[in-house]
Amino acid sequence: MSTVNWDEIKFRASSWGNLMTDSKDKKEVIGKTCAGELIKIYNQEKYGRKKEIITKAMDKGRIVEDASISMYSKLDGIIYFKNDEQLENEWFTGHPDVFSGKDIYHADTVDDMKNSWELDSFTPWLIEGADKSGICQLNVYYSLTGAKSGSLVRALMDCPPEILEGEKRKLLYSMNVISEFSPDYVKACEELVKNLTFPDIPEQERLIKITVPRDEELIQKMKDKVPVMREWLKNFHERHMNLYPK
């Protein structure tokens, strides 16, 4: 295990929704939700442990990412680029998905882009505003890149063939049928394909963009909280190490 300098820890963009949660007890600077996130960060930094959650929706998003960025560029009439770089500054670290501009360090806009698994997980975004996590995440990206604006972008792309075939196999195994030619399975399989592919839906109905303004006050509040959280992590570490002093 490597020694961690808690005074130099930088906080990931995706963590800030929890890190900026206020304590119910006004006397506490660090509330329970924030503390819970800090403990996850502690475990990752000190022990290299991080719970990796990989879902079929995430697999789909990885495979269709380039196609969704192309669709986004086409619909907006702007050339958007996939970002492959992990960025950091004195306070934050993060990986914006998409940007426009000269390069990621001189971006005009930065976006968080996700691909929905199905229609029912896509269309609710039409009435959803940007949540606290998304607002914090985008503003971290603004601090990292200097971008003035950005969006939470949600796309609806066809399920990739390799994942779709796996879903068909799972459906077959779950049904009490003789073979893949059984009428009940054929009908269920057709419904499955219809629910996971969208050739009948126009592209302009398959992308939702929620703009998040740059908030200098929020960015400063996050920066101001960094030394407080570093001190909390340092104290937590000392408490942990003193359970059974060597």
Image: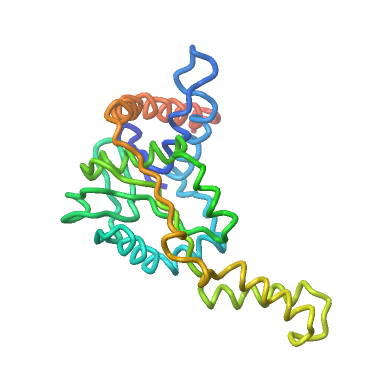
The x, y position of residue 36, in whole percent, is 53, 33
Residue nearer the viewer, 232 or 193: 193
The x, y position of residue 9, in whole percent, is 34, 37
Side of 186 where 25 appears, left or right: left
Q: Residue at x 23, y 45 (%)?
A: 145
Q: Residue at x 53, y 15 (%)?
A: 25
The x, y position of residue 67, in whole percent, is 38, 69
Q: Residue at x 29, y 36 (%)?
A: 214
* Above or below, comparing residue 117 to residue 67 in the picture: above
* Above or below, comparing residue 114 to residue 137 in the picture: below
The x, y position of residue 26, in whole percent, is 49, 13
* Above or below, comparing residue 200 to residue 132 in the picture: below
Q: Is residue 42 visible?
A: no
Which residue occupies the extreme top position in the image? 27
Residue nearer the viewer, 137 or 38: 137
* Above or below, comparing residue 122 to residue 135 in the picture: below
Report which quarter residue 195 is drawn in.
bottom right
Report which quarter residue 91 is drawn in.
top left
Residue nearer the viewer, 178 or 127: 127
Q: How is the image coloured?
A: rainbow
Side of 68 where 220 appears, left or right: left
Q: Is residue 57 visible?
A: yes
Q: Residue at x 31, y 55 (%)?
A: 98
Report which quarter residue 217 is drawn in.
top left
Number of numbered discs visible in the structure rendering: 0
